[in-house]
Amino acid sequence: SVSPIKVAITGAAGQIGYAMLFRIASGEVFGPNQPVALSLLEIPAALPSLQGTLMELEDCAFPLLAEVHAYDDAEAAFAGANWVILVGGMPRKDGMSRADLIRANGPIFTTQGKALNAAAAADVRVLVVANPCNTNCLIAKSHAPTIPSDRWFAMTRLDQNRAIAQLARKAGVGVGQVKKVAVWGNHSDTQYPDYGHAVINGQPATSVITDHDWFLNDFVPTVAKRGGAVIKARGASSAASAANAALDTIKSCITPTPADDWFSAGVFSNGNPYGIPEGLIYSMPLTTADGRTWNVVPGLELDGEARRRIEVSAQELLSERDTVHDLLGP
Ligand code: NAX
């Protein structure tokens, strides 16, 4: 019999957690032959409501769900975890600047980085969803020196999926016809959803969609501001689509990438790929051949506009890193 894969999820009582747990427990992510053990971390105040979710998980009678445990201690929750999804954090409140949000959430990732370093499985991979996800990921990573650099991911897949949907809608094709959509940079307004390398029905997106003003004037801002548009319409931030993007990220990391595609996630920038400063968690187009190690897609030609936007997002991440310099490990 196969031993369970252990998946730890923080913020499990939140809205993204609720949209994520059942799909993981169903076997959708790790496959129909892989049992799953869920290890959930919450703040003490949220544990009673999390108990209700645990009752519901039990009531699904998922055959692949081997175990579920809830904790308010990070090290206990992360013990032996193979995948860790860091969703828990403090949402932005009225009047809070981005810098305030970063300062409020940073300490959570100091604690959780240390706990990961102490307790996670040797093969652990970590996906940070909680915002500001790139910088939170950098903080956690800096406190976990025993976990290799290539095991850390910040979620930009929701941006990638939003970009795919907008391109498919504009071209009048199914989303499955749209490939090679990269998101560069920070999960913020400065991100660059790269239409220049996108492919629709095997053709460059820029030859299928001939209205070239649309890309910069409509597509890029629509993708970057989609989160705000969802909040306005729904009265709450993206939840099911965010959970879906987290699961897509994990599936992409554990499955060899199809030859005609790639995927995006924030990863540690080593050795200045595309001139991106070293030591940031920066979203880039990635592939994996073995479902374990990944590579940045090499040799992409970037025009002046793309290079400028990639640089602006890097500058923003450098300034976020400055904002939290005292929270970074050695
Ligand atoms: P919720 O406020 O519904 O849930 C957050 C949960 O985290 C709460 O249950 C809270 O008790 C818990 N929590 C707080 N501090 C914790 C700690 N120290 N340890 C464990 N749990 C803790 O937010 P939700 O809508 O689920 O969003 C969660 C995070 O995802 C937010 O930071 C949000 O900004 C971020 N998002 C990231 C996206 C991305 O594309 N990267 C998109 C969606 C989302 O906005």
Image (cartoon, grey):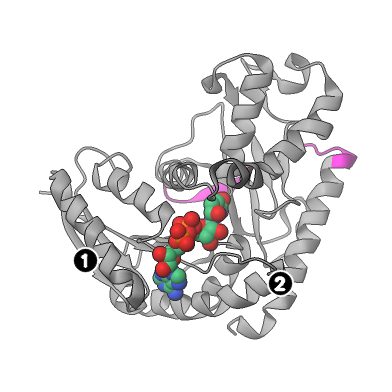
Query: Please, what is the three-letter code of the amino acid marked with disc 2?
Result: Ala
Q: Which residues are magenta?
A: 291-305
Asked whether residue 298 appears in the rendered view, the answer is no
Which sits in the foreground, 281 or 12?
A: 12
Return the mark for residue 256: none
Figure check: 328 above or below 3? below
Q: Callout 2: helix, strand or loop?
A: helix
Q: Quadrant of the C terminus?
A: bottom right
Q: Residue at x 65, y 66 (%)?
A: 94
Which sits in the foreground, 261 or 97?
A: 97
Query: Is residue 295 covered in magenta?
Result: yes
Q: Main secondary structure of the magenta part?
A: loop
Q: Where residue 259 sits in the image (x, y, percent)?
A: 53, 28
Residue 174 occupies quadrant: top right
Return the mark for residue 99: 2
Query: Is residue 214 covered in magenta?
Result: no
Figure check: 102 above or below 130? below
Q: Residue at x 65, y 47 (%)?
A: 228
Query: Please, what is the three-letter code of the amino acid marked with disc 1?
Result: His
- Give the Cα distance between marks 2 and 1: 34 Å
| Residue at the spot of label 1 | 69
Residue 168 occupies quadrant: top right
Q: Where residue 316 sits in the image (x, y, percent)?
A: 77, 62
Q: Circle 2: is it few (<14), some (14-19), or many (20+) Cα within 10 Å? A: few
Q: Residue at x 9, y 49 (%)?
A: 1
